[in-house]
């Protein structure tokens, strides 16, 4: 989506997608007008332009667009109501070579940006983390309790990074991280941290790996590509991790304490097929519906 508008959104020009087609709409003083293209939602690049000679159906404007305008690409910031101009969602896709009145816009230096990530020439299923941010899910809190499991697939070339963190304000927490090219699963039920680490060839080889990390009252298990590791709970009096906190993936916000992570660097790579299981509840984690995303492309991962 591209929006040109004055500060009060009285005058505007919007170039966006509706029903898989490009929609150009405008209001320059005498009411809105619009025109639709043929379908373009085919996953291929398309070139779109609107010249001064171009016409859209509707009343003739009685003035030019107010020069005191704002330009938004891809969506609208929080607090800006897009109802009048017909904008209800952000663009899930890629933009390149954007020009305005013949001037190429430098998209690498915006005045501000939010949740803008990379585009990939070839992609595959997964969620891409660029190492600079994180995803926050279950903002109202996730209770780990006595038994829980997390399963996912990952691909990375970095030897260190946060995969998952759930931590209470006290000491109860669970954490998954990459340390020296291996997966480390940490649990604290309140009496002390228990850590379980994979061994063997390093896992930061750019290939997909499957892991399942499970916590029970009496111990931990970690399975990576079919190889299983286990550790007993040395604190039998403490069997439940009492958390009611968000689930962080790929990193954690600055200033947010995590009691079961030894690294703070963000995960750089791809995650897919994420699930959290507790008792009879097995939840898929969809990053496209995350409470907060930064440095994450939720529905696309660069092909290896």
Image (tube, rainbow, N blue to C red):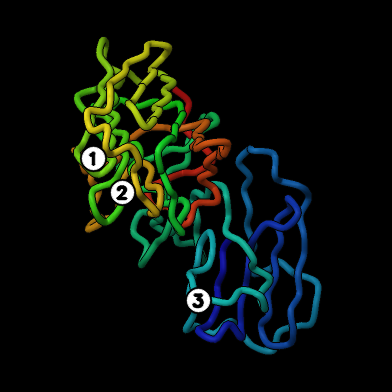
> Residue 39 vs residue 240: left or right?
right
Mark closer to the chain start, 2 or 3: 3
Q: Residue furthest front?
A: 237
Residue 242: x, y in percent?
35, 48
Query: Viewer-proximal residue, 189 or 282?
Result: 189
Image coordinates for residue 241, horizontal then vertical, percent: 34, 43
Is 51 located above or below residue 250 in the figure?
Answer: below
Q: Is residue 292 above or below residue 241?
A: below
State if disc 3 and disc 2 touch (CB < 8 Å): no
Q: Residue at x 33, y 37 (%)?
A: 239
Q: 212 or 279, which lies in front? A: 279
Number of residues whose C-alpha sits closer than 10 Å to that of mark 3, classed few (under 14), some (14–19) or many (20 or more): few
Residue 72: x %, y % from top left: 50, 67
Other-residue count near label 2 (Cα within 10 Å), few / some / many at <14 / 14–19 / ≥20: many
**For marks 3 and 1 on the same chain, the one whose residue lies earlier in the sequence:** 3
Gap in Å between the C-alphas at discs 2 and 1? Answer: 9 Å
Residue under numbered circle 1: 261
Please give the label number shown on residue 167.
2
Q: Secondary structure at mark 2?
A: strand
Which of pointers 2 and 1 indicates the residue nearer the eye? 2
The numbered mark at residue 79 is 3
Instruction: Please state the horizontal and vertical placement of residue 198, each as a whole percent of the image.
Output: 28, 18
């Amino acid at each position: 989506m591209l929006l040109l508008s004055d500060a009060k959104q009285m005058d505007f020009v919007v170039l966006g997608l509706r029903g898989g087609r490009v929609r150009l709409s405008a209001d320059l003083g005498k009411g809105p007008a619009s025109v639709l293209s043929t379908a373009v939602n085919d996953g291929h690049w398309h070139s779109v332009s609107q010249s001064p000679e171009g016409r859209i159906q509707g009343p003739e404007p009685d003035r030019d667009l107010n020069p005191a305008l704002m330009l938004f690409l891809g969506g609208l910031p929080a607090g800006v109501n897009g109802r009048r101009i017909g904008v209800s969602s952000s663009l899930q896709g890629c933009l390149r070579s954007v020009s305005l009145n013949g001037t190429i816009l430098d998209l690498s230096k915006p005045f501000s940006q939010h949740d803008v990530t990379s585009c990939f020439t070839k992609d595959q299923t997964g969620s891409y983390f660029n190492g600079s941010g994180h995803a926050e899910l279950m903002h109202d809190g996730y209770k780990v309790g006595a038994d829980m499991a997390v399963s996912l697939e990952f691909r990375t070339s970095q030897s260190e990074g946060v995969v998952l963190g759930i931590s209470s304000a006290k000491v109860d927490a669970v954490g998954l991280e990459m340390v020296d090219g291996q997966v480390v699963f940490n649990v604290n039920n309140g009496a002390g941290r228990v850590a379980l680490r994979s061994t063997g060839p390093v896992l930061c080889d750019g290939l997909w790996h499957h892991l399942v990390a499970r916590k029970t009252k009496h111990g931990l298990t970690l399975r990576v590509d079919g190889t299983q590791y286990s550790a007993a709970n040395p604190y039998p009096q403490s069997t439940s991790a009492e958390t009611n906190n968000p689930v962080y993936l790929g990193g954690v916000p600055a200033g947010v304490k995590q009691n079961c992570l030894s690294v703070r660097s963000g995960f750089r790579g791809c995650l897919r097929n994420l699930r959290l299981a507790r008792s009879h509840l097995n939840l898929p984690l969809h990053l496209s519906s995350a409470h907060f995303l930064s440095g994450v492309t939720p529905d696309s991962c660069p092909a290896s």
